[in-house]
Amino acid sequence: MPRDWWKGVVVYQVYPRSFADSDGDGVGDIRGVIERLGHLERLGVDVLWLSPVYCSPQDDNGYDISDYRGIDPLFGTLEDVDELIARAHDAGIRLVMDLVVNHTSDEHAWFVDSRSSRDSEHRDWYWWRPPRKGHVGGEAGAEPNNWGSFFSGSAWEWDEATGEYYLHLFSRKQPDLVWSNPDVRAAVYAMMRWWLARGVDGFRMDVINLIDKPDGLPDGDKKLGDLWGQAFPLVSTGPRVHDYLQEMHGQVFADLGRPYLTVGEMPGVDAEQARLFTDPARREVDMVFQFEHVDLDKGPSGKFDIVPLTMAELRANLMRWQVELDDVGWNSLYWDNHDQPRAVSRFGDDDPVWRERSAKTLGTVLHTLRGTPYVYQGEELGMTNVPFSAPEDFRDIESVNYIREQTAAGVPFSDLLPGLRFRSRDNARTPVQWTAGEHAGFTRGEPWIPVTPNHEEINAEAQVGVEGSVFEHYRALVALRHEERAVSHGTVTPLAMDHPDLWAFGREHEGTRLLVLASFTREPVEVPPELLEGWEGAEAVVATSGDAAAGVLTHGVLPGWESVVLRSSGTLAE
Ligand code: NOJ
């Protein structure tokens, strides 16, 4: 198996809390994943990325880990994970675990010891700092710097007992680790080797480009309206991140002797940095999750400030990444995940008339680009955003803290609702819609977050094996990546980049040429004739419908929100 085996695969992300509940407690679990492995097999995916199942107080749904080698009873046992690894491997699916080591839980033994006294063994594993000079600890303005947490409020928590603050870029229950401390790094690498020895096949590394904090922890800039200074520009992709990842590679993967996959989640990374992180010669990570395309609709006041986004802007961004990583480096391709709204509601058209077509077309584009595609649970069914209406509808700490902070500052909830409806992470966290029945077949108990009402129309039972469904289209796209090296390894040629509604590009590998045409509008799109020159006898290898293929090949017209992948030896017009 080649070292870069992951170029020809598709990864499926399971957010276990919302995937399938086997024991009726309303929360998804590992046995639920085992029971539903057949769904992944049927889809044909090669790798399962499992979001955290480790012991955790669940302040951030498991991204706050209190024991890296233990499984939270909410999700099952270590034996269940062993069984999942074995069953997945039997089904030809590799298992990638989440690695959350920018921070631990405040209930992790390391932090419990760290906060126990100023000279405890683990004190310098976390960022402890005295109050700002001339201030009294615990009072407003006494924080060591002005950084805001990504989950609202200050990034510093006062600890009365030892008279210092500790840093938490996320919630106060997620203290940041000090990566410049070699003991921290050694402990993390040992834990990773332990999981690999158990049979896992790699890691998705949570916010891994935030692990290097700037010397002196300087104040961040404050924009008009900011309550706190911006920590992000200061902590994103510090120079030592590369050293740490190279060291990790040497200590954990270099001698593994079997295929593995590493993907670094890297908010704020640009294409130039991504090339460095993923250049195989540098031995850092195999691919990155970059955020540019999912930040395009973010306004100046932050994540819940939504600005309109055109297809042309989205396309310009993703196609630039295609070009910039064409010779060196590798990218992950994703429309959504557990932190992002549902793809069809955000980038497609979730009106019932267009929902299926646009969900399929989003799939067509993503799965024929260069990079490794990720499918987030339910995306393959065209699951949508949720019609939230009240503060009680939200579970996610980010949304809950934001509502609390803003309403305390006098902003009415009704002003917050549009942003939350569009972008709250809870949109992606409602249960997977397996059936039209009670609780969508997710649980026989009461789900921890209600199922989306549209599960009666949108569910796996209604789609698996049903020709023309979103699921079957995704299945065809996964198969295409396996069979067609022009998809997995070909070059990319952006086409018709000034067209407002047609997303078009070519792929080419060893004489095979593919032409991908996708409509991002309800109206029929006339394909510019020069794109189709020489493609008269082409074969439609995948299409959202027979009409789409026939429309393009006989009339040069693509019906609204449809897409087609043509194969021939035709030329690709610029
Ligand atoms: C990124 C994860 O994907 C997100 O869910 C989490 O809240 C933060 N990192 C903190 O771990």
Image (spheres, grey):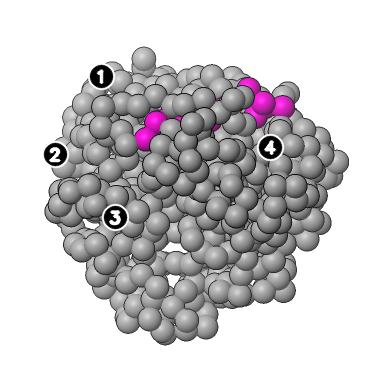
Task: List the residue tagged with mark 1.
Answer: 498
> Which amino acid type is shown beneath numbered disc 1?
Asp
> Which amino acid type is shown beneath numbered disc 4?
Trp
Image point (53%, 37%), residue name: 131
Residue 353, by quadrant, is bottom left
Task: List the residue tagged with mark 2.
Answer: 523
Residue nearest the observer in this picture, 376 or 59: 59
| 287 drawn magenta | no
Residue 270 vs residue 353: left or right? Answer: right
C-alpha gap between disc 2 and disc 1: 17 Å
Position of the N terminus, as image quadrant, is top right
Q: Earlier in the sequence, mark 2 or mark 1?
A: 1
Magenta residues, as a range? Answer: 228-243
Q: Disc 4, disc 3: CB below 8 Å?
A: no
Callout 4: helix, strand or loop? Answer: loop
Viewer-nearest of discs 2 and 1: 1
Task: List the residue tagged with mark 3.
Answer: 404
C-alpha gap between disc 1 and disc 3: 43 Å
Q: Is residue 53 visible?
A: no
